[in-house]
Amino acid sequence: MTKKPEFYAQTPVGQDDQINDPFAFKRDALSDVLELIRVRGNTVFTCAASAPFGIRYPSGKHRLHIVRSGSIAIAAEGIEQTYRAAQGDLVLFTHGHGHVISDQPGREADGLYDLAKRDYDETRLALGSGETVWLCGDFGFDGMLSRRLLSILPPVIILKGLRDRPFEWLELSCHFILDEALNPRAGAAAMISRLLDVIFVQLLRTWAAGGEVGYGWLSGAIDSRISGAIVAMHAEPGHAWSVTELAELTHLSRSAFAERFQRVVGQTPLAYLTGWRMARAAELMRYGRASISDIGARVGYTSQAAFSRAFKSQHGMSPMQWRQSDADDNVN
């Protein structure tokens, strides 16, 4: 009889399997964190308009806009700056700010849902008509843990000038998303979610590679000198890592590694390790059914009391409270 796993959140392919399987993908730090965030694409539709126009998108959803033709002005609630985007540009609202999209700043704007009641063609997934066209999608993320991880990102991310081959790739993705939505087949919702997920990942890593990321887990994940150490911590959070041991993985001296890690990530290597352990523990409690003491041991704590103190310091509640609050969220 097959034994049910205690840790449903565990990555299906273990390290030994990756070593023995020549076809296994090599893990990377960004993929590890994105698995914790658990992004999922939700709805998608197109907006089209001719000047003058203004559409107000309510707060609460993490929206993505991809400009397919024309240009738009973007004003977000609580942010003084006005943004511009044109064909091939991507705009992501990482914290769910309400915003207005218009042809020119300062236009009067109609509410999105008010417009939808009178001008949404469900057969074409199209709101309005006109020369300026943009695809609109929204994302969901996994609860409190994702909010903590995404908090380092700015409220608005804009990638400009994705034309030529990148733009062709983006157009192809938009085409597939709309085709799945307009001609639903078995698995269409999953396909749309995965395609939006792919666009989100591409947007995030392209933006990060542009050098505007500041510091935090994302900057560390893409830094070629220290990412090897981060991958190792991600793979074996229960190991008693030392700064010297981590430095050896990066081929830097202990002092050079510690200085670079602090400068790039904004915290010491061992502080990062503690944060990752608590993130993994939170995920294991949400998606697994192992005991709290077993989860603590898995992430490097032989004492349940020490594990509980570290967890509460990171998440503001004890492991038991976290597990119970998550169960209440699932019931509600």
Image (spheres, helix red, strand yellow):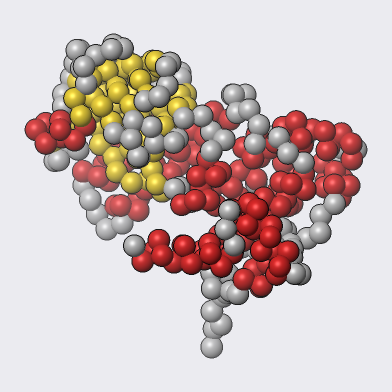
Residue 115 in view (yes/no)? yes
Residue 29 occupies quadrant: top right
Please report the residue visible at 29 percent of the width from the left and 43 percent of the height from the top.
43
* View extreme (bottom): residue: 1
Q: Is residue 267 left or right of residue 118?
A: right
Does residue 104 sit above or below 5 in this rendering? above
**How far from the left and from the top, in percent, is residue 190?**
35, 53
Please report the residue visible at 15 percent of the width from the left and 30 percent of the height from the top.
115
Does residue 33 sit above or below 151 in this rendering? below
Please report the residue visible at 40 percent of the width from the left and 61 percent of the height from the top.
329
**How far from the left and from the top, in percent, is residue 27?**
65, 50
Does residue 91 sit above or below 21 in this rendering? above
Does residue 202 sit above or below 288 in this rendering? above
Q: Is residue 124 left or right of residue 98?
A: left
**How far from the left and from the top, in percent, is residue 1?**
54, 88
Q: Is residue 305 left or right of residue 212?
A: right
Residue 206 occupies quadrant: top right
Q: Nearer the viewer, residue 226 or 271?
A: 271
Quarter holding the C terminus is bottom left
Q: In this figure, what is the number of numbered marks? A: 0
* View extreme (left): residue: 118
Residue 210 occupies quadrant: top right
Please report the residue visible at 45 percent of the width from the left and 24 percent of the height from the top.
158
**How far from the left and from the top, in percent, is residue 110?**
19, 25
Q: Is residue 173 left or right of residue 188?
A: right
Q: Nearer the viewer, residue 107 or 205?
A: 107
Residue 280 in view (yes/no)? no
